[in-house]
Image (cartoon, helix red, strand yellow):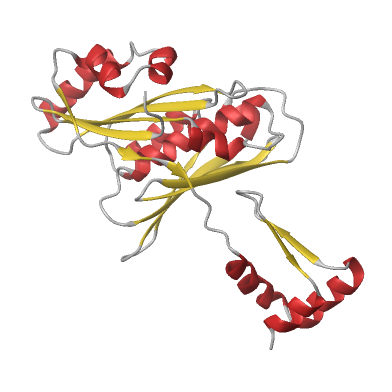
Amino acid sequence: MQNDLLHRYIFEQHDVRGELVQVSDAFAQVIKDRDYPDAVKKLLGELFVTTSLLTATLKFQGHINVQIQGDGPVKFAAINGDHEQNLRGVARMQGEVKGDGLLALMGKGHMIITITPIKGERYQGIVPLEHDSLAKCVEQYFAQSEQLKTRMWFATDISPGQERAAGLFLQVLPVNQDKATADFSHLETLSDTVTEDELLNLDAHTVLTRLYHEDNPKLFEPQPVQFKCTCSREKTIDALVNVGKDELLADVQANGEIVINCHYCLSEYRFNEEQIKAIFN
């Protein structure tokens, strides 16, 4: 099975659309060399496929950020993506992780979805974390922001060397309401039978054939998904300029050099006194 692919599909006789994403290498890069607890790794896997699936709903070129934040042991977790399915993510903790449900990890908080078109106005939607599963929170977001019935199913495997995550997405089309509602109910019942093992270990065509073999799902060309960080030495320099020359030189005098680490890919950027002076010349 080819890894790291997003599949879009529709039904000829039903006013419903769907997506299926399966990732391994891209997800593994998000948690590589991190000391995240297992529950946080699993949450990032679900957040990763959520962002991929939501990015696929964009009808324009742009970026999306899906972030959850709260007052629990996990301060926030976020995945950034774009219309080309380039994604990166990070989580930050502020306490000992003991539970594994969303509310046990995040406490009282919100999910914030920010959509930024390359051309057009930025949009942000916020929903409270009222459910113990990320899928339910995303479904609530669609019900609140677009009034569209939506369902999501997730599966993750965080075994060392076997890191994988997958997500199934089903959404009613905004057309004939009565027919679309009936169509969605029918396909939702079928989708509820999917297992985590099927989502993680079977190719997309097999999964969809098993679920909807009498409903003729039509798959479009799959889109590759990859981990990609946009950090660079140039962007780091731009950030340092905002700090100011005197403060930077004082930091160098105290510590020998300035070291900046990217939170997403852990790349390290070092600057000595001569390099700092050159930035401002």
Residue 39's image quarter?
A: top right
The C terminus is located in which quarter? bottom right
**Above or below for 266 versus 213:** below
- Which image quadrant for residue 55? top left
The answer to whether residue 117 is left or right of residue 50 is left
| Side of 147 where 12 appears, left or right | left
Residue 272, position in %: x, y?
80, 72
**Total count of labels:** 0
Residue positioned most to the bottom? 281
- Image coordinates of residue 263 in percent, x first then y, are 65, 51
- Of residues 279 and 1, the one nearer the viewer is 1
Q: Nearer the viewer, residue 273 or 138?
A: 273
- Residue at image location 47% in from the left, 46% down from the top: 87
**237 to 206, vertically: above or below:** below
Residue at image location 72% in from the left, 34% down from the top: 35
| Front residue of 143 and 281 | 281
Would you place residue 189 above or below residue 62 in this image? above
Tell me where residue 96 appears, x and y as whole percent: 76, 31
> What residue do we see at 9% from left, 27% from top?
12
Q: Where is residue 212 in the image (x, y as percent from the top left)?
A: 20, 16
Screen quadrant of the N terminus: top left
Residue extending furthest right? 254
Considering only vertical position in the picture, is 137 above or below 280? Answer: above
Q: What's the residue at 30%, 48% (across, down)?
A: 58
